[in-house]
Image (cartoon, rainbow, N blue to C red):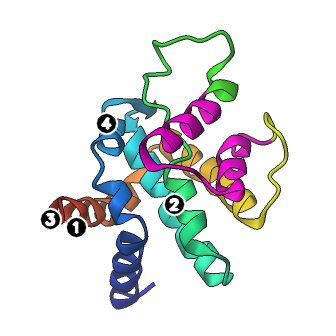
Amino acid sequence: MNRYREEQSINEYCVTVGDLLKHEKVWEMKNYPHHGNIDTLFHSVYVSYNVFKISKRLKLDYKEITRAALLHDFYLYDWHTTKHDEMHAWFHPKQAVKNAEKYFGGLSQMQREMILYHMWPLAKTPKSAGGFILTFCDKHCANMDLLGLSKSFSPVYIEIIKRSEDNV
């Protein structure tokens, strides 16, 4: 992708999720390690930016889909140290939905299912194209995180964070 088109994508992504990125609870995600040395906010922006680009290209409701993707891991705890009655893989999507609804109001049925089912095949099969896109982007980005290859996304992430801080 050329620099100009990437700049346009970053601008439109920030318009789509800017209000979420300005919220203090979303920023709290920086405090929680996710995969290796990657924090949950970096991972969630990485996933949702990829979801944004794919869903836009496929002419889907990219706004609704991207917003759900940013909140897919909005569980707000360190899963390495905080334990629950069920494994993190099954617990965290439910907690992410609860937190999203608590801090941002109701989710659409599609957004709810996207978040709840993003751990497929450990969870139910996604019911929407957006759900499948989120699931596959999450798996791809998690692997990139674990292999130490997410750093290629860092310049885009830094620009997105800079723009969200400028607008706070």
**Could you tell me the amino acid type at mark 3?**
Asp
Secondary structure under the numbered disc 4 in the rendered image: helix
Which residue type carries mark 1? Arg
Q: Position of residue 81 (x, y in %)?
A: 45, 12
Is residue 140 a member of the stretch shown in magenta?
A: no
* Magenta stretch, residue numbers: 92-120
Kindly identify which numbered label has been placed on residue 28: 4
Q: What residue type is labelled 2?
A: Arg
Q: In which quarter of the image is the C terminus?
A: bottom left
Is 131 on the left-hand or right-hand side of 50? right
Q: Mark 2 points at which residue?
A: 67
Principal secondary structure, stretch drawn in magenta: helix
Q: Is tag 4's residue or tag 2's residue first in the polypeptide sequence? A: 4
Q: Name the residue under label 1.
A: 163
- Tell me how far mark 3 sits from mark 4, CA to CA: 18 Å
Per the image, label 3 sits on a secondary structure element best described as helix
Q: Classify residue 52 by image quadrant.
A: bottom right
Mark 3 in CB contact with mark 1 (< 8 angstroms): yes
State the SS at label 1.
helix
Residue drawn at (35%, 70%) of the image: 14
Q: Is residue 115 above or below residue 136?
A: above
What percent of the width, then of the height, locates residue 40? 42, 39
* Sequence order check, earlier mark of 3 and 4: 4
Determine the image quadrant of residue 16: bottom left
Disc 2/disc 3 C-alpha distance (Å) = 20 Å
